[in-house]
């Protein structure tokens, strides 16, 4: 964290480093309050916190499962909820302005293999992306967008540690990938991910809202990038892609038919939580 702050400051920016436990909603609210106090507004949220454990249900202890759910989908939900009021204040039309980038994968069945407990949480994060995008559209918030981003390239299983912050299913160099068993030719520099984040937040909302994209594919599609060698940790290497080339759309013919939609928030509250 200290290194990141120094890099931002040296590049001419300004950074505020805060230690946050995303399992604690009060911690999250304090982080947002301190950010608003220092900068006056909030424009972009990138949720990059994560916990990882790849194993079968049988070999995933309940405490490990609960940790992943609290850090991954629950932490995301709390952070988004704390940030939304400030994103809604942006802009002149009263509808808000800003971007949310979630580090979670497209939803497809192969991702479940060998890591059901982990995938449950990550798919939940992607579901939030798709669901909130529908809410933004329904409410006419055309200057707000939420997008899920995931790495495309591959790495060997030994690369992964219990920290999911920088090495999720991807050959991106990080402290967690400094493993003597790791083939460095399979690694990419983290700049491919940061470049993809920047491309997403600078894209028109209609191009990114509700989408679950891969870093390499998005840079090809929206930035016209064709040469990815500059991202290879070992010059001349080509890290193997492990993500599918195409994903299911999850759309159905009755997509616009919601039936009798119920809004629980509009109903009388008979009990307190």
Image: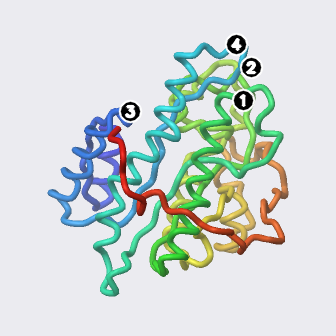
The residue singled out by tag 2 in the image is 56
Name the quadrant of the N terminus: top left
- The secondary element bearing badge 2 is classed as loop
- The secondary element bearing badge 3 is classed as loop
Neighbour tally class for label 3: few under 14, some 14-19, many 20 plus, Cα within 10 Å: some
- Spatial CA span between label 1 and label 3: 21 Å
Q: Are marks 4 and 2 in contact (CB under 8 Å)?
A: yes
Q: Earlier in the sequence, mark 3 or mark 2?
A: 3
The residue singled out by tag 4 in the image is 59
x, y percent for residue 75: 44, 40
The residue singled out by tag 1 in the image is 116
Quick check: 188 above or below 260?
A: above
Q: Is residue 180 visible?
A: yes
Q: Are marks 2 and 1 in contact (CB under 8 Å)?
A: yes
x, y percent for residue 270: 36, 47
- 161 horizontally vs 186: left or right: left
């Amino acid at each position: 964290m200290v290194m990141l702050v120094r890099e931002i400051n040296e590049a001419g920016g300004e950074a505020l480093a805060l230690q946050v436990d995303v399992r604690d909603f009060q911690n999250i609210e304090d982080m947002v309050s301190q950010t608003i106090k220092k900068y006056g507004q909030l424009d972009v949220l990138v949720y990059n916190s994560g916990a990882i454990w790849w194993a079968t249900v049988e070999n995933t202890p309940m405490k490990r499962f609960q940790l992943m759910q609290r850090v991954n989908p629950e932490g995301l939900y709390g952070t988004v909820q704390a940030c939304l009021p400030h994103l809604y204040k942006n802009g002149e039309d009263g509808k808000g302005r800003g971007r949310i980038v979630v580090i979670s994968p497209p939803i497809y069945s192969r991702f479940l293999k060998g890591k059901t407990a982990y995938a449950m949480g990550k798919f939940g994060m992607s579901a939030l992306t798709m669901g909130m995008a529908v809410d933004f559209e329904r409410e006419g918030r055309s200057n707000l967008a939420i997008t899920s981003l995931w790495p495309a390239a591959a790495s060997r299983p030994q690369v992964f540690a219990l920290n999911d912050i920088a090495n999720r299913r991807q050959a991106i160099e990080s402290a967690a990938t400094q493993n003597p068993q790791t083939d460095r030719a399979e690694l990419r520099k983290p700049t491919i991910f940061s470049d993809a984040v920047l491309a997403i937040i600078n894209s028109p909302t209609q191009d990114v809202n509700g989408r679950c994209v891969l870093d390499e594919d998005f840079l090809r599609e929206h930035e016209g990038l064709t040469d990815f060698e500059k991202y290879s940790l070992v010059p001349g290497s080509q890290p193997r892609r492990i993500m599918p080339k195409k994903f299911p759309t999850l759309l159905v013919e009755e997509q616009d038919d919601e039936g009798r939609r119920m809004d629980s928030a509009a109903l009388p509250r008979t009990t307190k939580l």
